Image (tube, coloured by chain):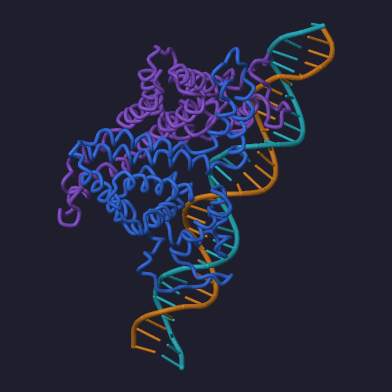
Chain colours: A purple, B blue, C cyan, D orange
Amino acid sequence: MTERADGRASERVVPEAARRRRRPTKQGTVLSEQVIVDTALRLVGQHGAGAFTVRRLGAALGADPSAVYRYFHSTDDLLLAVADELIGRGLHGWRPTGDWRADLREVGLRVHAHSLAHPQAAVLAAYRTTGRANEIRTIETMLGILRDAGFPDPDAVALYHAFIDQALGFAVLDSAALALPAPAQRADLDVWDTAYRTLSPATHPHIAATAHLLAADMRRSAYPLALDLLLTAVAARLPQP
Amino acid sequence: MTERADGRASERVVPEAARRRRRPTKQGTVLSEQVIVDTALRLVGQHGAGAFTVRRLGAALGADPSAVYRYFHSTDDLLLAVADELIGRGLHGWRPTGDWRADLREVGLRVHAHSLAHPQAAVLAAYRTTGRANEIRTIETMLGILRDAGFPDPDAVALYHAFIDQALGFAVLDSAALALPAPAQRADLDVWDTAYRTLSPATHPHIAATAHLLAADMRRSAYPLALDLLLTAVAARLPQP
DNA sequence: CTTCACACGTCAATGGCGTTGTCATAAGCT
DNA sequence: AGCTTATGACAACGCCATTGACGTGTGAAG
């Protein structure tokens, strides 16, 4: 995003492609969009989503915080770039095989897994529409998979939407749980082994009958099952040739 | 929440039950946990999630912002109280009808809709396991629906897990989009009408062919479709009696 | 009915945040 | 070599959550 919503080029930010002079900071770092995005990801990964502030980012970069605004219009703009970077890393090197169901399954699992690898960043960025390169490439690929499989355009779009939002929704949920402070995370898991194990069959027959299954199941992500259920239902909708 | 995680009572906050002296503020309001929670909900509902700051809450209450800290340890503590209130309202008055598919559908839509009505609180609360009364009641009810429908226990548990996390995942995703600052929200929606509408059919044939459908579809939540897809696949798994 | 302890609303201050206007300087073109 | 200007640095603004000190009105005790 090198232009503003109103179409005028920003006074402050010059597009990465048009950059000529690269002037090192006082501490010697040479800045670039890529360096800033990578540093932001590292910062969030190491110190949690709460550590993501322009001032701390400046410190991590070895530059004045305001230097970031030479590359991004705002923190929000930067966040979108981080989100796009995550999308790109998730599908790096992947190619569709031609089997639409296997391809969708693989993409879903990849998006989910890569979000969990950077839970703090995923929580911040998963629900944004970036309009940037990696996002565009992903949408093009997945729409292609669905249209080539034989779904008419309105179905392809609606099914893509449901598919990607389910992947991102589970990613946010599971990421958020992972990004929780360690004590809170432990406490939340313990609830299944304590509070729910001790309910009386008289008052809570269904929970009492399945408490051991609940405690085990809730430790895993439900996404793989939800993904397969979705794909099963989608397959049932495929127009027969 | 009147005690800290470490078990010590806070020096500053006295539990609602132990409160004796109710001293009106300069502007005449009489404070209480309930008044603060209600005002916070009204604030978020009327002026958007971005309006939720302690300072503005103080203004809306007709009290000094710091007075809030006599009732809650932090804004996070307050938001959890708000979320807890919401769980109670969400399924208030609902009873299962005996039609398992219709019942699951109704619960899913209710959870989703109630989250969207208070996005800020939903985003913070959706991924926590509270083990409190309302949560327990909900799980008992839904496990009952699935087991009574004829699913064996391991399936009932796994399907419940997938179902509830799908509902919460979409709720978080859609809530987060709603909770965005107004400019970012507008920008995210505009992307579909600008960036994606102008891609060339030569480089991005699938997006170009469906750009108008995309722009329209992405304005709505994909949850209703995803929910029906899930229920369709679940129905196909139901053991025949 | 008076007294008194203290709960709780208020004030002021702290330190952090994003963002912007201004300046000076080094990079790269001519 | 000289000039332009992109770009990093600095300082300042207004917002935020949170906290310690203070004094006042309240409810209970006698």
Residues A112 and B91: in front is B91
Quarter occupied by residue A7: top right
Residues D20 and B78: in front is B78
The answer to whether A57 appears left or right of A193 in the picture is: right
The image shows residue C7, relative to residue B87, as above or below, that is below
The answer to whether B188 is drawn above or below residue B87 in the figure is above
Residue at (49%, 56%) from the top-left corner? Answer: B41
Give the quadrant of residue A219: top left
Image quadrant where one finds the N terminus of chain B: bottom left
- Viewer-proximal residue among D16 and B170: B170
- Residue under the image location 59 percent in, 35 percent down: B189
* Whether residue B236 can be seen here: yes
Q: Position of residue A212 (x, y in %)?
A: 17, 41
x and y, in percent, of residue A93 in the image: 43, 12
Instruction: From the viewer's perspective, tell me whether residue B71 is left or right of residue B96.
Output: right
Front position in the image: A125 or B31: A125
Which quadrant holds residue A200?
bottom left
| Whether residue A58 is visible | no
Q: Position of residue A147 (x, y in %)?
A: 47, 19
Question: Which residue appears at 46% of the width and 36% of the height?
Answer: B222
Q: Is residue A36 left or right of residue A212?
A: right
The quarter of the picture where the C terminus of chain B appears is top left
